[in-house]
Amino acid sequence: MDHIRNFCIIAHIDHGKSTLADRLLEETGTITGKDSQNQVLDNMDLERERGITIKSHAIQMNYKVDGVEYLFNLIDTPGHVDFSYEVSRSIAACEGALLIVDATQGIQAQTISNLYLAIDNDLEIIPILNKMDMDAAMPEEVTDQIIDLIGCKAEDVIPASGKTGMGVVDILKAVVDRVPAPKGSSDEPLQALIFDSVFNSFRGIIAYFKVQNGTIRKGDKVKFVATEKEYSADEVGVLKLEPEKRDFISAGDVGYIISGIKEAKEVKVGDTITHRDRPCEIAIDGFEDVKPMVFAGIYPVDSNDYEELKVSMEKLQLNDASLTFDYETSAALGFGFRCGFLGMLHMDIIQERLEREFDMYVIATIPNVSYKAYTTKGELVIVNNPSDLPEPGTLDKVEEPFISAKLITKVDYVGPIMSLCISKRGVFQNQVYLSADRVELSFILPLGEIVFDFYDKLKSVSRGYASFDYHPIDYVESKLVKMDILLNGEGVDALSILIHRDNAYHMGQRVCAKLKELIPRQQFDIAIQASLGSKVISRETVKALRKDVTAKCYGGDISRKRKLLEKQKKGKKRMRQVGNVEVPQSAFLAVLKLDD
């Protein structure tokens, strides 16, 4: 155990952690020329294209220092706020962390939040200044920011470049010297932390774990504490570039277990594995069920594809246990699913994976969050869909989730960012200057306001410089109302929104104006209305296409023309009563991306 080092990489999105991981793998001889490619650990095409890590990845490396062979277990973690629970479990499986900061951008919001997670778990932090080969690098300035943040010395910060390989040997030496060996005993009862799981179509669910105490052998009868399920360890092994079988894995090491599990719900990240016959006394703390934060309806573009979409969603859930879905129907869109996502990026990725991996083109409804509604009888109703909200006569109050948000920006953009947060019903908490030209703003915001278009607007008002990180705090009572969109008096349930009363009029006008642009003209007038209960708060009209019925009248008495016009008017009235208004898919998508 003295020669084992378990460490992870934490950084903000796009600070170069996957590229630096490639250099570490090359330097330790873990990957050779034929395996080499950019972002080796990002094995999804989507991760490579977007340059982000979506899933944690673990790999074992061997490295010799002064004739002594060391075993490194590296866990590459996602940087995006949506996957922060996964990051927290990966951090709990380590004793050290490489804190990577981009020398051209400096410290950003998720750098700080992931760093706090690492400090809470008593990890040894090794600060690394990445992208030092770039002309825009600001080594002295960013080094000062790191020193202010973690209180280290300037010589502790390792200058490096993931592109050129500069500083990689220094990083590996620092891992050996600074990261402590894992603590624990292989004689104690088995206690292992699951930090990730993947689905294999031949073997079922493969769980990745770190053994804190005890030993797990092939053929052992094991129990997963949180789910209380028991399995047989059909295969255990370590995570090289390809998984390698072992007869046993002992305290301090990282490995995988295959036990023929078919349901993703049975393996929960953060759960504890122990022996059935000799269980550990307490589970490893920190486990919690991942709760979806954002909900949206997903429907097939062609209603005949519903069964195929159902199969695709089930397969996708095997690979991504944080995706939840229930069946729902909509009068406008037919059969579909009510899905729960960790955040907006997660929702975007699921839609893209459905298209790429399963050729399923889908319509997503307006995303909303989970609200708590209380009836006059004191009953609690969890509202994930606007149509679940109790009727106004029976509704007592509605509570919505609030978040604590940290925004890091250049001083020049403080004003526009504050205006944006206040327009989203934010409450200013604190302002801290991290350096002469960088400031951290703290706000309390309603989650429902940021799932809509907050992130895009933040990037535009700060010209891409601001970074954003948040965590949920609590539910707070709010004046929320359900806004319905009516077409010729018929409600379109997929466009219903739960919204704060103060914003309802403005939002209603925007939605109606946008729909007027996008709904094609028919042979009859189409009234587009936004209503709160029975009160209409905004209206637009799509004018009818008009055929010139009087063209054949050459002069003559006016009564002939009037007769033809009256006949046309009656026909239009009848058509309006029986005609259906088709809402094009572009209208649903445009309402999602409403801009001021």
Image (tube, rainbow, N blue to C red):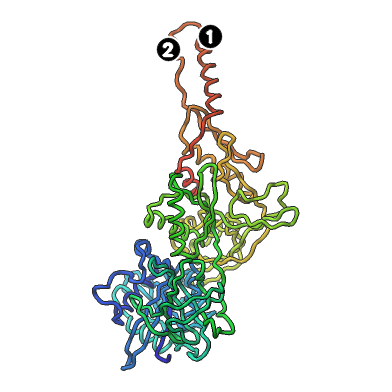
- 56 relative to 190 in the view: left or right: left
Outermost right residue: 377
Q: What residue type is labelled 2?
A: Lys
Q: What element carries label 1?
A: helix
Query: What percent of the width, then of the height, locates residue 46?
Result: 37, 61
Q: What element carries label 2?
A: helix
Q: What residue type is labelled 1?
A: Ser
Between discs 1 and 2, the one toward the N terminus: 2
Query: What percent of the width, then of the height, locates residue 435?
Result: 49, 73
Outermost top residue: 556
Above or below — where is 573 with respect to 108? above
Q: Which circle marks residue 476 in the picture?
A: none
Circle 1 Cα neighbour tier, 10 Å, few/some/many (<14 / 14–19 / ≥20)? few
Above or below — where is 304 with respect to 61? above
Residue at image point 49% right, 84% down: 212
Comparing 508 with 213, the one in front is 213
Above or below — where is 558 with respect to 205? above
Query: What percent of the width, then of the height, locates residue 57?
Result: 40, 73
Q: Where does the N terminus fall, quadrant-wise?
A: bottom left
Viewer can see residue 161:
no
Circle 2 Cα neighbour tier, 10 Å, few/some/many (<14 / 14–19 / ≥20)? few
Label tally: 2
Above or below — where is 588 with respect to 219? above
Task: Give the quadrant of residue 76.
Answer: bottom left
Query: What percent of the width, then of the height, locates residue 401?
Result: 61, 60
Q: Which circle marks residue 552 in the picture?
A: 2
Residue at image point 47% right, 6% down: 556
- 404 relative to 109 in the view: left or right: right
| Residue carrying label 1 | 559
Viewer can see residue 202:
yes
Comparing 100 with 103, the one in front is 100
Spatial separation of the CA atoms under disc 1 and disc 2: 14 Å
